[in-house]
Image: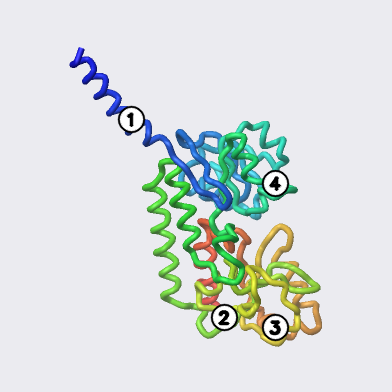
Amino acid sequence: MRLFSLFVAGLLALAAPSALAQERAIESCAATSKFKAAPSRVITLNQQATEIMLALGLERHLIGTAYLDDSIPERWLATYKTVPVIAKQYPAREVVMAESPDFLFAGFASAFGEKRLGAEAEWNALGIGTYVVNAECRNLHPDDVKITTAPLYIDIERIGALFGAEDKAKALADDIKARLAAVAGKNPGAGRTAFLFDSGTETAFSAGCCGTPALLLDAVGLKNIGADVKGRWADLAWEKVVTANPQVIVLIEAEWSTAAEKIKHLKNDPVLSQLDAVKAERFIVLPFSQTLLGVRFVEGVEKLGADLAALK
């Protein structure tokens, strides 16, 4: 009898660590979601969330995606096409519920806004885990403090750990760090001022002091003409742009405001057309997805650096 008890105790001791190893948790801006195993029915609600999953080779966990800002890179396109797109922008709450997800992964806090899917806590109460990328946690990253690349590495590490892809996550983070360091070492924007133009005609929607767009300019050594304006993004008066007379204009290519439309506006305006950068056509175009603190941020930095080096 004693031998049998010891045998059973031994089996339980062996099983316990394995069972515990399957339990995992992920801390989001507003909540912590716990799982007995890696989520298997994941819906990504923004492009940068989708691309983190694809970059880590986690597509088999995806049952739906939503909200593209621009195109998916060729290297992930075939895989991306195997996952259903459940909405062009944010899906309705009922559409999400119908898919029976166990995890919702968002690139913007707006996904869980009152007029979108509703608060994370509401989904957590239903047993559905949630995660918003760390850069969107305004309680951790206020609008008057310059953001760094640290939130990106937090996302990669947390998502990798949640899905048991720690090795891939480390390799991805190490690659991004090395590539960013390589561009910083060249400092291609040194001594140049830049105006980042996202959209707008009455005012210019541009980079403020402290968000990812400003980080993008800083990463190549450019001086942001909106660096003295509080916020991640800022509405700049055109008078400020004219006074600054930036040496380079970085144009965001987005579905809602194309680079071509912005160039047309600049060239057709009697005052803006006289800016040195406009007359010399010192324009650099970046897709919106490369200005976000996702896995393609490094591509934006690299492209910006290469295009700066090519400018006369």
Counting the numbered discs, the total is 4
The residue beneath circle 3 is: 279
Contact between labelled residues 3 and 1, with CB atoms less than 8 Å apart: no
Q: Which residue is mark 1?
A: 16
Closer to the observer: label 2 or label 1? Answer: 1
Q: Nearer the viewer, residue 241 or 72?
A: 241
Dot 2 and dot 1 residues touching (CB under 8 Å)? no
Mark number displayed over residue 90 = 4
Residue 81 visible in rendering: no
Residue 166 on image: x %, y %: 39, 47
For the residues bearing labels 1 and 4, Cβ distance under 8 angstroms? no
Instruction: Tell me how the rendering is colored.
Output: rainbow
- Distance Cα–Cα, label 2 vs label 4: 35 Å
Say which label, 2 or 1, has the lower sequence index: 1
Q: Which mark is residue 223?
A: 2
Of all residues shown, which one is farthest toward the front?
2
For marks 1 and 4, give the one nearer the viewer: 1
The kind of residue on which mark 3 rests is Lys
Mark 4 or 3: in front is 4
- When asked about the image quadrant of residue 212, the answer is bottom right
Q: Earlier in the sequence, mark 3 or mark 2?
A: 2
Let me know if residue 90 appears in the view: yes
Which picture quadrant has residue 6? top left
Instruction: Please name the amino acid that badge 1 sits on.
Output: Ala
Give me the C-alpha separation between circle 2 and circle 1: 56 Å
Q: Nearer the viewer, mark 3 or mark 2?
A: 2
